Amino acid sequence: MEGTPPPSRPAPHTVYDPRCCEPLRNTITPPCQPTPPGRHTLKNPNYTLALALAQAGWNNSETARRINHRAEQTGQRGIAVDRSRVSRWIRHGEKPRHPVPELLATLLTEHLTQPYTPRLLGIAADHSLHISIGETQHHTLQAKAAAANMPAEDYARALLHTALSDT
């Protein structure tokens, strides 16, 4: 049809280097994953880990291979990391089980010749809680967080802290 502009494409995602707020070049950002209808989860991608792996030049398969090899070398049984698991650490902020965070931090420290820890990489064990809430609750949470000039996660964390402090 003449005069009709071509359909627009969504703007590309930009990943910023957390150390200097500059856009990273030659990086592939994880695509947005649609949330199932009626459910919103409070999960964040681990850009710090993605940046460290990019600096090392390792893709998800190479990262998994190196972790498994180091586990085998050190006699640690039951470690079977695959590329999809590494992807979940990056895309969804999942935390690997012990001893994987320490193995990965050691591998990156040796390869990049700068110190890395599981906490610095955002893969240290923590006491996080991922919850699913309905669409109405999500919109209410977003509105109240915006009114408080806070990110929704920080607002939800403050609500939980207040609720649990009263007991």
Image (tube, helix red, strand yellow):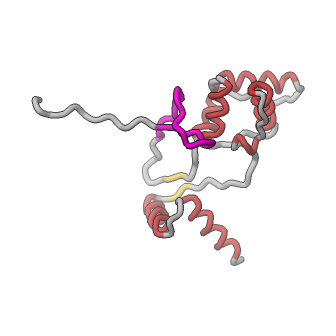
Q: Is residue 54 left or right of residue 147?
A: right
99 sits left or right of 64 in the view = right
Left/right placement of residue 6 relative to residue 138 reads left
Q: Nearer the viewer, residue 140 or 136?
A: 140
Measuring 48% from the left and 37% from the top, which residue is drawn there?
14
Is most of the magenta stretch helix, strand or loop? Answer: loop
Specify whether 120 is left or right of 72. left
Please determine whether, in this image, residue 44 is positioned above or below residue 70.
below
Query: Relative to residue 54, is residue 159 depicted above or below?
Result: below
Give the image quarter of residue 5.
top left
Image quadrant holding the N terminus, namely top left
Out of 66 and 5, give the one closest to the viewer.
Answer: 5
Identify the image quadrant of residue 157: bottom right
Question: x, y percentage for residue 115?
Answer: 79, 35
Image: magenta residue range: 14-33
Q: Position of residue 57 (x, y in %)?
A: 65, 23
